[in-house]
Image: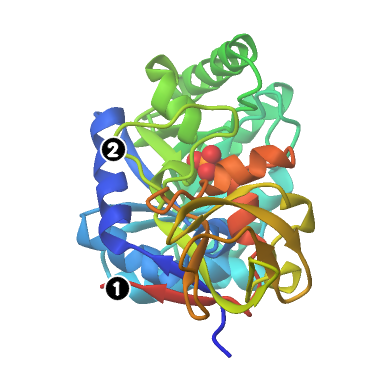
């Protein structure tokens, strides 16, 4: 029996990257790769992005960063921002991965591991600008910056960046966060040279709020063509992945297709529009390994049905599906299980 397929279009991914790059210039693009490149596959994403000349990759963790490094070879910069174990720090130093640092404790461990290895760790210091999730508080910023400069003088560290992450809940809050961020940058500039990378914004703020962009923008969703929930479609940005399944049986004029909740489709998506050879049809029910789709004229066993995609066959996008269940498009993609076969175009 044929399994559902996540078909991933490499040309569309490259086109999205170009559209994002044009939009955010002169800010530079960091392609974010977390959650196995939002369910598309990390190796594929790095190879394709490398072809378009992307320099920066955001891997989230060191393990994924090491995988990205295998694809990139000696080229490109990789940024891993989750707090890591000492063993992972050692791996990061060997693989020339930049580390995001959001606590004095982590900074001390990185400095110690770099000293031990006789290496210079490249770090990006994170100021907490309101999210309260892994970041130095303004009150401890100046002291920590002094520690970083001491680590630089001793040859163990290089301050390559300053960064934070926005809530993207309201423009006012993001403006306040930027003010804190710029204060933190000023403190760093008073203590020594300005780091090469200043980064604050992800997809939505990078696209819509040019005044918030730093020299670098960390962008995942829009590169994969996933628009923001409740946000508009974006010119030149197209969903890269489509989920297809085939008709296995015809039941009372409806199509039973081979994809279900075991593949990661939430059963609460019943009622959504899916694509068929006859155009848009209602997804009537989702069971464990099959779903029922409203029939169309001439439907046959073996026909394809599109659960989500770019809309060519009347299907909704992952984000449109997500909006039905108060979620985000990324979530629909990353929930897909290993039962779904990933197929990529060259
Ligand atoms: C996920 C993430 C991003 C990318 O967010 P998108 O909205 O997908 O562009 C950027 N920075 C950090 C720290 C993240 O966790």
The reply, left or right, for residue 311 in relation to residue 2 is left
How far is the residue under mark 1 from the one under mark 2? 30 Å
Name the quarter where the N terminus is drawn.
Answer: bottom right
Residue drawn 78% across and 73% down? 288
Q: Quadrant of the C terminus?
A: bottom left
Q: Which residue in the protein does label 2 denote?
A: 236
Kind of element beneath mark 1 = loop
Residue under label 1, please give it.
Answer: 73
What residue do we see at 27% from left, 38% from top?
19
Residue 127 picture location, percent across and down: 62, 30
Asked if 173 appears above or below 167 in the picture, the reply is: above
Residue 77 on image: x %, y %: 35, 56
- State whether residue 227 is above or below residue 247: above
Using a 10 Å C-alpha cutoff, classify the residue at mark 2 as few (fewer than 14 neighbours), some (14 to 19) or many (20 or more).
few
**Residue 64, image x, y percentages:** 53, 68
Residue 243, given in percent of the width and then of the height, sits at 51, 64
Q: Which mark is residue 100?
A: none
């Amino acid at each position: 029996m044929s399994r559902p397929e996540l078909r991933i279009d490499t040309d569309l991914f490259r086109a999205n990257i170009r559209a994002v790059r044009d939009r955010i210039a002169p800010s530079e693009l960091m392609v974010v790769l977390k959650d196995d490149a939002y369910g598309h596959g990390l190796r594929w994403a790095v190879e394709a992005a490398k072809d378009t000349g992307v320099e920066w990759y955001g891997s989230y963790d060191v393990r994924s960063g090491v995988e990205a490094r295998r694809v990139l070879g000696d080229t490109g910069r990789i940024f891993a921002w989750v707090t890591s174990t000492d063993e992972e720090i050692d791996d990061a130093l060997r693989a020339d991965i930049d580390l995001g640092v959001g606590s004095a404790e982590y900074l001390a461990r990185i400095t110690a591991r770099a000293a031990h290895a006789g290496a210079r760790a490249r770090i990006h210091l994170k100021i907490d600008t309101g999210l309260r999730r892994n970041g130095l508080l303004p009150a401890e910023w100046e002291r920590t910056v002094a520690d970083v400069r001491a680590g630089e003088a001793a040859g163990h560290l290089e301050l390559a960046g300053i960064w934070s992450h926005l809530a993207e809940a309201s423009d006012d809050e993001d403006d306040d966060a930027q003010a804190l961020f710029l204060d933190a940058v000023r403190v760093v500039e008073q203590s020594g040279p300005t780091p090469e990378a200043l980064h604050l914004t992800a997809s939505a703020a990078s696209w819509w709020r040019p005044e918030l962009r730093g020299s670098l923008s960390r962008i995942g969703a829009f590169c994969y063509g996933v628009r923001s929930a409740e946000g508009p479609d974006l010119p030149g940005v197209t969903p890269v992945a489509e989920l297809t399944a085939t008709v296995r049986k015809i039941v009372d004029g409806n199509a039973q297709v081979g994809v279900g909740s075991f593949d990661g489709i939430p059963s609460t998506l019943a009622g959504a529009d899916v694509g068929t050879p006859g155009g848009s049809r209602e997804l009537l029910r989702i069971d464990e390994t099959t779903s029922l789709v409203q029939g169309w004229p001439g439907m046959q066993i073996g026909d394809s049905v599109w659960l989500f995609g770019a809309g060519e066959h009347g299907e909704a996008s992952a984000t449109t599906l997500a909006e039905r269940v108060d979620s985000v498009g990324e979530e629909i993609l990353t929930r897909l299980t290993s039962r779904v076969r990933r197929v990529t175009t060259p």
